[in-house]
């Protein structure tokens, strides 16, 4: 360990001269003792520098992507799988309540709550506005006569919650409430009864 001595010179304290001290009595005497000068000694330790350490940089291998990653199928494949037989290329527009829905066999839709329907009940939707196949279109005026959409009730559920917030400035008024609209999930099983209705041919667009 190496030591280093650094002398520090301190000013010698002298007795201050008091010219006018009005706040002390006349018989009061002040005495100051001069302190001896001090020397400061600073010890600095010289430690040996640590030996260098050999470090190796390890590169992380990229994560392997599985070959059988989930890749969505094309829309045409999904539509072909959703249909069954001759109904694979058919869809209809049906009105339920005050809303219109596009339905296809094998697919499901969420509609307004059907109060009288229970789970696994088979229902028939006869307010069909349009039926379309690959080469013909059956357009109702206003509905397609004798056409029917067959469906099965799968679930009676609720929509996602909607927050209703009311606020009036400078009135100390605010209200917050949530609402979940009831709905019904229907699985479309088939479309029938449209064959005898007059159809309009679908013109093929030249390539």
Image: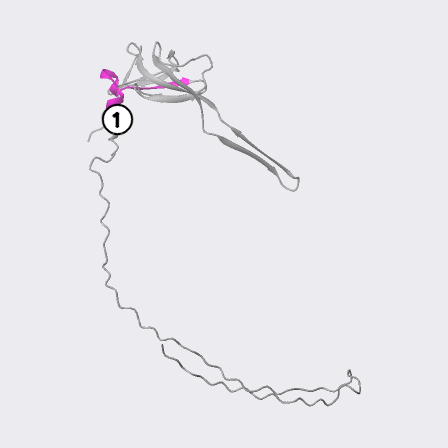
Is residue 190 part of the magenta span, yes or no? no
The x and y percentages for residue 74 are 24, 31
Q: Give residue 102's position: percent from left, percent from top.
A: 35, 22
- Out of 145 and 117, give the one closest to the viewer: 117
Q: Is residue 126 left or right of residue 195?
A: right
Colour option used: one colour
Where residue 7 sits: x, y (%)?
Answer: 47, 85
Image quadrant in which the N terminus is located: bottom left
Residue 146, horizontal then vertical, whole percent: 34, 9
Q: Is residue 44 above or below residue 168?
A: below
Q: Which is more toward the observer, 81 or 42?
A: 42
The C terminus, quarter of image: top left
Residue under the image location 69 percent in, 87 percent down: 31
Say few, some or many: other residues with alpha carbon within 10 Å of mark 1 (under 14 / 14 to 19 / 20 or more). Answer: few
Q: Which residue is mark 1?
A: 78
171 left or right of 69 in image: right
Q: Secondary structure at mark 1?
A: helix
Residue extent of the magenta highlight = 80-95
Toward which corner of the image does residue 155 lie, by quadrant?
Answer: top left
Number of callouts: 1
> Residue at the spot x=63%, y=41% of the render?
169
């Amino acid at each position: 360990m190496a030591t280093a001595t650094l002398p520090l010179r301190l000013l010698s304290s002298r007795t201050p001269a008091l010219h006018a001290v009005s706040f002390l009595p006349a018989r009061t005497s002040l005495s100051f003792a001069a302190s001896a000068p001090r020397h400061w000694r600073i010890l600095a330790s010289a430690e040996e520098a640590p030996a260098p350490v050999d470090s190796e940089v390890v590169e992380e291998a990229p994560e392997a992507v599985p070959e059988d990653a989930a890749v969505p199928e094309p829309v045409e494949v999904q539509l072909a799988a959703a249909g069954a037989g001759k109904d694979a290329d058919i869809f209809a527009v049906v009105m339920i309540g005050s809303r219109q829905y596009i339905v296809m066999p094998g697919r499901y839709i969420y509609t307004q709550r059907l109060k009288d329907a229970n789970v696994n009940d088979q229902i028939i939707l006869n307010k069909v506005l349009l039926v379309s196949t690959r080469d013909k279109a059956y357009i109702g005026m206003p509905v397609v006569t004798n056409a029917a959409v067959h469906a099965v009730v799968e679930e009676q559920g609720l929509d996602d919650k909607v927050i209703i917030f009311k606020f009036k400035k400078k009135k100390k008024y605010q209200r917050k409430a949530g609402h979940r609209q009831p709905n019904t999930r229907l699985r479309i099983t088939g479309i029938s009864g449209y064959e005898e209705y007059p159809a309009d041919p679908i013109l093929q667009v030249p390539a």
